[in-house]
Amino acid sequence: MTKSTQPSQPTQVTTLADLQRNFISDCLSGKLKQDNILLAKDIDSSVISAQGLMGIYQNSAIANITNSLILTYPVIEKLVGEEFFSAMCREFIYITWPKSGNMDDYGAEFPDFLAEFEHAKHLLYLKDVARLEWAFHQSSLADDARITDWSTLAQASDILQLQFLVTPSLSLVTSTFPIDKIWHLNQDETSPDTEVEFDDEQGNDTFIVLFRQQLKTVVLPITAGEFVLLKAFDNKYTFEKAIVAATQKETDFSIDDSLKKFIELGIISGFSESVTAQL
Amino acid sequence: MKKIKGVGLGLRHQHFQEFIEKKPDVSWLEVHTENFFSEHSTSSKYLAKIRQDYPMSAHCVGMSLGSAAVACPVREQHLQKIKKTIDWLQPSMISDHLSWSASDGVHYLPDLLPIPYTEEAFEAVTKNINHAQDVLERQILIENPSSYLSFNDSTILEWDFLSALSKKTGCGLLLDVNNIFVSAFNHGFDALTYLESLPVEAVKEIHLAGYSIDIVEGKEVYIDTHGQKVYDGVWLLYEKTIQRFGEVPTLIEWDTDVPELSVLLAEKKKAEAIIAKVLNKQVA
């Protein structure tokens, strides 16, 4: 691939803004065809056609975006296989262009896409596994919790009117599928021969909390009552109203056990006496 | 802020644990700034430990300095995140590319896209570099790109464009020897002419990496993949680079199919041997 090193004389100049708009459009609008390349008149195609040249950039851009989706959705990639995952990502990218240079922000719409994608929508659990992976990604990136002096809790005038604060890395996910088991079985250290048993008949929903402990993001199954309790704390309910909500969901719910567990795990990271939200 | 010299390595997450536990003998490390935008993320916590033992350089991929729109919210937001990251990372050097990623203030293609070398582009890049240096309150280095196409409207040679940018904005240059080699093949220019045209005092850092070869419509195209060992031709060009620019801090970059750290350390030794040979120094 060689051409003259001397720049040619311009004929009809395209502004830089137009050129860049067309470049992105060519790379992300779908399959390139010789007659639909917006940039064709602007690039030197004397050795390789505009389709061939833009194809290099399109493949590179899509590979970069796909790599960021692989980092966020490694279990989905394992479940459907590398080749299918890449093909699926390409279709997703064509309709979901990145809007930020921070690729950590990219891919929130992927779970909904999976539910609608013609060749994958029969895999009903995929969307929920992807929701779990997005939650994991968010927890991994979240701020640390502030350190709380728990000794001052005893001085609270009315503990039932307190708000318990949750760690910024908290994520809550629920599903009608055993997505926590699917997720665990597809981690690198798990034997590939292990299978997940689906238990649709009993309709047992799965409730999961995700949070970060030091360098590790934890995926932990919890009860329905605990799920509602943490959701209530996250929504800044008072302690009293959070207990009511949890007990309504789970009749034999034990607030003492759950509160102790979540404080020890660092999921509940503090408390506040200023009530800013109500049921 | 520890000063950078000698041959460093690009720090990748596959090697975090090894750097923390074994503290391999490497002069300095470079990170992709965008991977550490969240100060509290797991990756940032690893980096916070590693940076206690190694001088750091911050290499950015998303400033989009070649974008037409100077006032662009999506780029401004990105620049602020870079500032926040370097505030805690305290790198000795900050660099990005002569390329663009953002268009229209709304869309972002995560790649290093080529610009036409025109007066209009020169004005835009100049304003963008000045703005970045103002916001970051320090000099940045601009890396020469690798590219696979050229624009009909270009009227300035790439090396002249870079030299003029350096003179007008006071930015430094990051010389990617592999990129020169790749683009020289793809566009048919003389790599030595490129080297000889750049101002010696502006070059503050050198990158070395591997490329791959694609066949497009029956023609070979060199692709800057950073997924292989440095090619022999690039090592030869590196020798010429050291002859012209002296002992500039050099980085071994490897971004795809990242191998065992020992492979990168062996590449580092090769670079050190070339520096020693050219400058008549003893290898450590």
Image: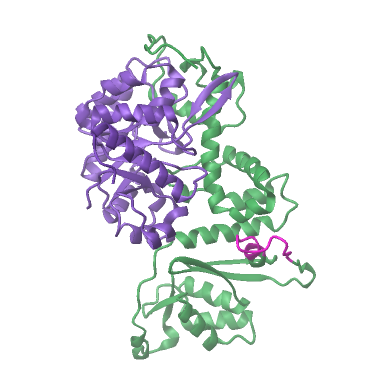
Of the pair B158 and B169, the residue shown nearer to us = B158
Of the pair B11 and A43, the residue shown nearer to us = B11
Of the pair B140 and A116, the residue shown nearer to us = B140
Q: Looking at the image, which residue is at 42% across and 60% down? A: B41
Total numbered labels placed on residues in the image: 0
Residue A134's x, y, as percent? Answer: 55, 57
In which image quadrant can residue B233 be found? top left
In this view, A253 is above or below B116: below
- Inspect the magenta stretch and tell me whether residue A186 lies in it: yes
* Chain letter of the purple region: B
In this view, B178 is above or below A198: above
Residue B96's x, y, as percent? Answer: 33, 38
- Chain A display color: green
Q: Looking at the image, which residue is at 37% across and 8% down? A: A9
Q: Main secondary structure of the magenta part?
A: loop
Q: Looking at the image, which residue is at 46% across and 81% down? A: A264
In which image quadrant can residue B210 be found? top left
In this view, B148 is above or below A138: above
- The span picked out in magenta is A182-196
In which image quadrant can residue B230 be found? top left
Residue A23's x, y, as percent? Answer: 48, 27
- The answer to whether residue B43 is seen in the rendering is no
Q: In the rendered view, does A22 fall on the left or right side of A31? A: left
